Amino acid sequence: MKSSAQVVVIGGGVVGASVLYHLAKAGWTDAILLERRELTAGSTWHAAGGLHTLNGDPNVARLQQYTINLYQEIERVSGQSCSIHLCGGLMLAEHEDRMDFLRMAVARGRYLGMQLELITPNEARDLFPVMDPKYFVGALYDHFEGHVDPTGVTLAYVKCAQQLGGEVYTHTPVTGLAQRPDGTWDVEIENGDPIHTEHVVNAGGLWAREVGRMVGLELPVLAMEHQYVLTVPVPEVQAWNKQTGKELPMTIDFGGEIYVRQEADGGMLLGTYEQAAVPWSPKKTPWDFGSQLLKPDLDRITPEMSVASKHIPTMATVGLKRVVNGPFTFAPDGNPLVGPIRGLRGYWVACGVMAGLSQGGGVGLALAAWMTAGDAGDSGMDIFAMDIARFGDYANLAYTNAKVQENYRRRFQITFPNEELPAGRPLLTTPIYDRLTTANAVWGATMGLEHALWFQKAALEPKEDVTFHRSNAWDCVAEEVRAVRTDVGMTEISNYAKYRVTGAGASEWLSSLLTQRMPTIGRITLTAMLNDAGRIFGEFTVARPAEAEEFYLFGSLPAEVQHSRWFRHQLPKDGSIRFEVLGLALVGLSVTGPRSRDLMASIAPDLDISTEAFPFMTFRKVDLGMTPALLGRINYSGELGYEIWLAPEQQRALFDRIVDAGKSHGLRLFGMRALMSLRLEKSYGTWFREYRPIYTIPEAGLHRYVKLDHEFIGRAAYEAQVAEGPSRRLVTLLLDPDPEAPADVFGDEPIWHDGAVVGWVTSGGYGHFVGQSIALGYVPADLADASGRGGAGFEIEVVGRRRPARIQSEPLHDPQGLRMRQ
Ligand SMILES: Cc1cc2nc3c(=O)[nH]c(=O)nc-3n(C[C@H](O)[C@H](O)[C@H](O)COP(=O)(O)OP(=O)(O)OC[C@H]3O[C@@H](n4cnc5c(N)ncnc54)[C@H](O)[C@@H]3O)c2cc1C
């Protein structure tokens, strides 16, 4: 056994094996995989092996396609059969909402290059003859789904990795991890001396939590029990196989909450994500658990089985051969956990993979790219939907256990784009939570923090009727937008990420990371952050309140862990600079609208906030009456407005004073939905939608965020991009109304031009003040000019209907930006 290696992968399930293979393929051949028992001795050996291409995140969907494509290659290279059955996949819709869901999936699949088609229930029965079509309204057929043998796949990865130089040691449990002062690791094993390595990958599957605890981490992972049944051969299926020469497709019956596929002998495999879900080992996974199954519990899945026997009548009579009950792990949102851990050099995770056969290849590819080429964004991939950094410290054991169970039960249910799921909430709240609740706020949560989405009319229940179309929020949001544009509104902005950077040299350090130099005293700067490849890795408002080397950065809350991991990684080793994540130590309010100055003046009569004394983009430490605050003249609505940052213990008092004073200024509370509508009317992009690490500054049209008066990460790449010119560009599109089925885009819809899909929507909605349905999205650069070919011929597919659209070249509201500067 080797005593050292560049990287040690812990865990020989399908995920660890894929990571080893992809590392070796990327050139890291001095790589070892350690497996406690036999390969696959976690959840892998008893997986049903199903392959699916659909995912709520298009970037993850791409990696699922990659995974399925990979199987033929590793089978060929290794000589190990993976038992690949690309028999197609069928998704059955039980009602019109589900059809809308499938229509949107088909639409998204168009720019992902997927082969998806919508079919009738009878056409579905032609492909899956055991179903009763009367329970369904339609279906989606995916030509590129099927199933594989999980053990064959794992062995194939391993054999390919071994051919490249990777090594695998089975029956070698890792018992501990000790980090040396230089950041390298000693991997302690049960049966030998520690192995010294630079990088450790936790691919511990069912034991990933325990391998996390070896370094003091509580990873947001929980295993759930999961059952499928295997029937005896079904003569009807055998006859159909013979007659057509085909195998039954992988079928999901969403309404019945079941999935079905065919076995080699003509029997069926039927599994369910049952409502009576049971977590497995919610606190600690026993080390003595091996390649074994849990006790079957058919009672628990009786409700789903009885629906199955109606929808698939054969199931009512066919004999069961075997019941498999096995555990497998989930993260709170059902996507994998991949990437480095903030502040823990050389420790990587590839765990929480609930669909290891559909996703394992993509997880291995993404992690290997990240480890070998630096940040994942540098390799052109955007895997935030799998990045461990999408969860913060709030995602502890109890939170994870609540969310995973919710996610498991909802596995086959629709989550609407405007739906907020209830488990684990409310968790983080600010001091004005009760005030806003009294004002009838409808709440959403991001990174565990509650924020007001919109305010329901008095006496009506503060609840959104979730839909793919326009919800009951419509009128209320319209009124909130109108109040901001014509009078004044106040919203809470504590749900921004806030950072404070201090210390000698802070200005130079930040300038070396950001595309603008730091602001002068009392000013604000808007800036981007690039990675080495010149892709947009962050977007921030930076403010400097006073002379000291003290800067405040405001950014996206969902990216807080990801961005702080990056900033910390870049800190000078001499400790001269302090980087703080302020979290809820700083909370915020935004007061905006044409009457906002009058309102602010009335609560701070001693403060001169005239345009001359406090112009646009000013940022200062002030006293608003009795409340010390940081006051910035900036906002996201495109109106005159102020952002107020203050200590949480001051927030209620100030809120009350503003509400009180606001009575004579027409003040109205507004929420995130109105803010999104306001920013669309100004064509302002937002992080994770218009700006992500797959886009560049020239593509996003963010040149105003860049000044070439200093050196910064990604500058050379940026200059090359400018010289070359972008191949696609971010544009604003206006959709024609659709009186028959009023709806707006949510994001990820395809953009058509002259009958072909040419781009995709990043976000959109309704601009309530301008009265337009608006979409932001990327299209080929030669179509981005409204006066050229882009002037006509666009369509956007909204919930299955192609709607004519045209490019809007300048912001719909106040294109010169005079109102916010007045
Ligand atoms: C009933 C059932 C049906 C399923 N059906 C499907 C399906 O149809 N399609 C699909 O894509 N997925 C399916 N899955 C999920 C799939 O099994 C998992 O996504 C996959 O197995 C995860 O693989 P993994 O490598 O992350 O974890 P695991 O398979 O759990 O592997 C982890 C490995 O790490 C080893 N290990 C842990 N700790 C240590 C240590 N300290 N030292 C050394 N070794 C260690 C373990 O022994 C284990 O072999 C199903 C799961 C179940 C239970």
Image (tube, rainbow, N blue to C red):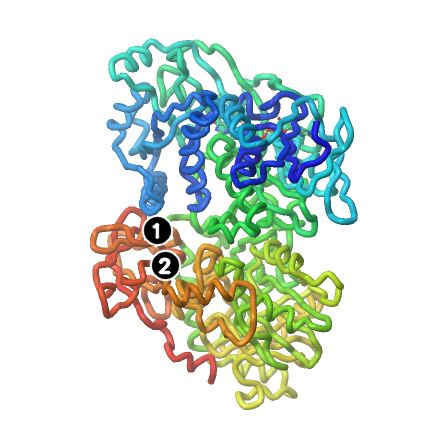
CB at disc 1 and ligand 1 closer than 8 Å: no
Give the amino acid type for the residue marked by disc 1 in the picture: Glu
Task: Tell me: residue 403, above or below residue 234.
Answer: below
- Residue carrying label 1: 749
Q: How many marks?
A: 2
Which quadrant of the view contains residue 208?
Answer: top right
Horizontal and vertical percent position of residue 346: 67, 45
Extreme-bottom residue of the structure: 612
Cα distance between the residues tagged 2 and 1:
9 Å
**Residue 479 makes an appearance in the image:** no
Q: Nearer the viewer, mark 2 or mark 1?
A: 2
Residue at disc 2, secondary structure: strand
- Front position in the image: 546 or 782: 782
- Residue carrying label 2: 777
Q: Residue at x 39, y 18 (%)?
A: 262
Residue at disc 1, secondary structure: loop
Q: Which circle marks residue 307 in the picture?
A: none
Is 685 situated left or right of 107 in this image? right
Task: Tell me: residue 765, above or below residue 323.
Answer: below
- Quadrant for ligand 1? top right
Horizontal and vertical percent position of residue 675: 47, 65
Name the image quarter holding the N terminus.
top right
**Residue 572 makes an appearance in the image:** yes
Is 140 situated left or right of 500 in this image? left
Horizontal and vertical percent position of residue 150: 50, 24
Give the amino acid type for the residue marked by disc 2 in the picture: Gly
Q: Residue at x 29, y 51 (%)?
A: 797
Task: Tell me: residue 572, above or below residue 324.
Answer: below
| Circles 2 and 1 in contact, beta carbons < 8 Å | yes
CB at disc 2 and ligand 1 closer than 8 Å: no
Horizontal and vertical percent position of residue 87: 34, 25
Is 267 situated left or right of 664 in this image? left
